[in-house]
Amino acid sequence: MSLRQFEYALAVAEEGSVTAAAERLRVAQPSVSQQIRGLERELGVELFARTPTGLVPTVVGRAFLREAEVAVSASRRARATARAGAAARWTSP
Amino acid sequence: MSLRQFEYALAVAEEGSVTAAAERLRVAQPSVSQQIRGLERELGVELFARTPTGLVPTVVGRAFLREAEVAVSASRRARATARAGAAARWTSP
DNA sequence: TGAGGTTACGCCTATCGTAATAATG
DNA sequence: CATTATTACGATAGGCGTAACCTCA
């Protein structure tokens, strides 16, 4: 379970398809597909239902994705916080 | 920037030393040291000050760790949510 | 010199991308 | 047949552990 898997899953949920998510993430489709399947295998649950036109989150998937979103946004704030601190070291030494 | 790095950094902050954190995490000391340094290098900022007796978070480090803690706990909730959903598939099919 | 942290290095797993394979309208 | 997802597979990068090195009281 990694932040990358969370980001991929969120992109798939938002875009509705692996293909569109991969384009947005600038990654090959199989990479996204692999990460999603690896996540589902690790958790032992189907996060997305497979439809002819793409992937749509299951009930469990939606609950999972809410927490994943919290984790990803917190990690971005962590990065931003650190970078701001690094910059401050130079603007006001 | 990964959840593992966050967990390692949080353990180091709580234990006050790499050695103690590594023991708690059941990992070799160098692994923890490497992850912390990799994180600091990636962010371009010193998260911990090195003292003779161990590592203590800097000001920036403390701000970073607050967000890291949010990310880690959210990821744990995500896992728990998914596992509960997987279990529910069996208890009430 | 003892207790801590870091660096070097080899192994092993994971991730990626390309290519090939399925399935569905 | 076009579009989507998945699997296979080889190459590369990242993480871990052991061993060696450094620093400071």
Image (spheres, coloured by chain):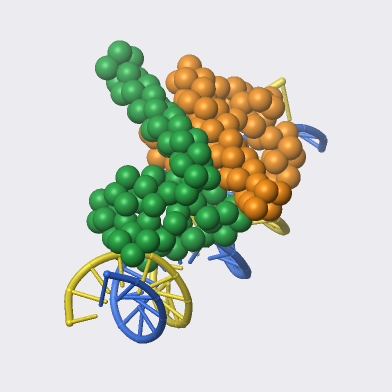
Chain colours: A green, B orange, C blue, D yellow
- At x 57%, y 54%, the residue is A45
Is the N terminus of chain B in the top left, top right, bottom left or bottom right quadrant?
A: top left
Residue ranking furthest to the top: A92
Q: Position of residue B34 (x, y in %)?
A: 55, 44
Asked which quadrant contains residue C20, the reply is bottom left
Residue B75, percent from left and from top: 54, 38
- Identified at 62% across, 40% down, the residue is B80
Q: In terms of depth relative to the viewer, which is nearer, B27 or B55?
A: B27
Nearest the eye: C16 or D5: D5
Q: Is residue B68 above or below residue B23?
A: above
Q: Is residue A43 left or right of residue C1?
A: left
Please indicate, yes or no, whether residue B36 appears anywhere in the rendered image. no
Residue B89, percent across and down? 63, 51
Asked if residue A63 can be seen in this view, the reply is: yes
| Closer to us: A83 or A93 | A83
In the image, C23 versus B18, the foreground residue is C23
Rendered image quadrant of residue B20:
top right
Above-or-below relation of B28 to B53: below
Measuring 55% from the left and 28% from the top, which residue is drawn there?
A: B69
The residue shown at (39%, 52%) is A56
Label count reads 0
Position of residue A6 measured from the top left corner of the image (x, y, whole percent): 45, 45
- Where B20 falls versus B56 (above or below)? below
- Left or right of residue A58, residue D3 in this image: left
